[in-house]
Amino acid sequence: DLVKTATIMSYIGTGANRLSEIASRCQEPATNLSRPLKKLIDLGFLLRDIPFGIDEKNAKKSIYKIADPFMSFYYQFVVPNRSFIELERKKPIEQSLNEHLSEYISNQWETLCREAITGNSLNGVLYGKAKRWWGTVNNEDGNPEQIEIDVIAESLDKKYLLVGECKWTSQENTQNLNKQLLRKAKLLPFAQNRTIVPVLFLKNPPQKNTAQTLLPKDIIQLLK
């Protein structure tokens, strides 16, 4: 069991986040992984991410993530490069960091943004637990379309639905981002009869303040 759980952690740390992907890498049926995955979740090593609005007991879609950011870094960058580290080969390690560090930081930024919104007030509105949402919706033409929203939280009075886009890059076109975010939000089946509150979570201040934005300093303040 110890070997299996360590192997599972390693696979998840290097990008196998769905049950089918983990099972494929382990070369085992997905049913064989339910017990070790539950154990890792109960111990606080893993998180099971389920789309907003779906009951955990009936959820068919889920993503598994390493809970601790430092442990996530260890499994993504240290474990795969252990032989290079032992031999003090710097170039392969530097290449790995250059290729994937931005992605790692972006994922951690998303997590921090969701934690900052959960149970906090924004512009006088108190929100519940913030989560991600991904799935298939019918677009304006009535065709199925896959969309993903980084942050979704419902106000405790159920009147407002906060939707957020997280970006850890520079010089974002906030007007375009806000437009795309609103479009996706209006396609959500559970957004009806709620006031949609779009928020952009950005690394740097926007050049043109055309949308509501939260920056790292705002997230830190909300997390206090």
Image (cartoon, helix red, strand yellow):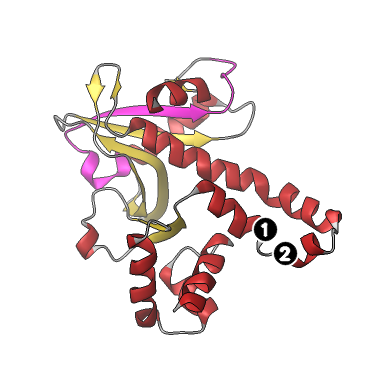
Instruction: Provide the secondary structure element on which disc 1 rests.
Output: helix
Q: Is residue 174 left or right of residue 186?
A: right
- Residue range of the region highlighted in magenta in the rendering: 186-208
Q: Amino acid at mark 2?
A: Arg
Asked if residue 203 is among those painted magenta in the image, a careful observer would answer yes
Residue 83 falls in image quadrant: bottom right
Q: Amino acid at mark 1?
A: Val
Q: Residue furthest left?
A: 157
Q: Quadrant of the C terminus?
A: top left
Q: Residue furthest bottom?
A: 28
Residue at (79% x, 50% y) in the render: 94
| Residue assigned mark 1 | 78
Q: Is residue 144 left or right of residue 193?
A: right
Residue at (51% x, 84% y) in the render: 27
Q: Residues within 10 Å of mark 1 (few under 14, many from 20)?
A: some
Location of residue 222 in the rendering, given as x and y in whole percent from the top left corner: 38, 24
Location of residue 21 in the rendering, given as x and y in whole percent from the top left corner: 49, 72
Q: Quadrant of the N terminus?
A: bottom left
| Residue assigned mark 2 | 82
Instruction: Provide the secondary structure element on which disc 2 rests.
Output: helix
Q: Give above or below for 222 relative to 164.
A: above
| Spatial separation of the CA atoms under disc 2 and disc 1 | 6 Å
Between 135 and 214, the residue placed more toward the observer is 214
Labels 2 and 1 touching (C-beta < 8 A)? yes
Residue 121 falls in image quadrant: top left
Location of residue 122 in the rendering, given as x and y in whole percent from the top left corner: 31, 21
Q: Is residue 143 left or right of residue 210?
A: left
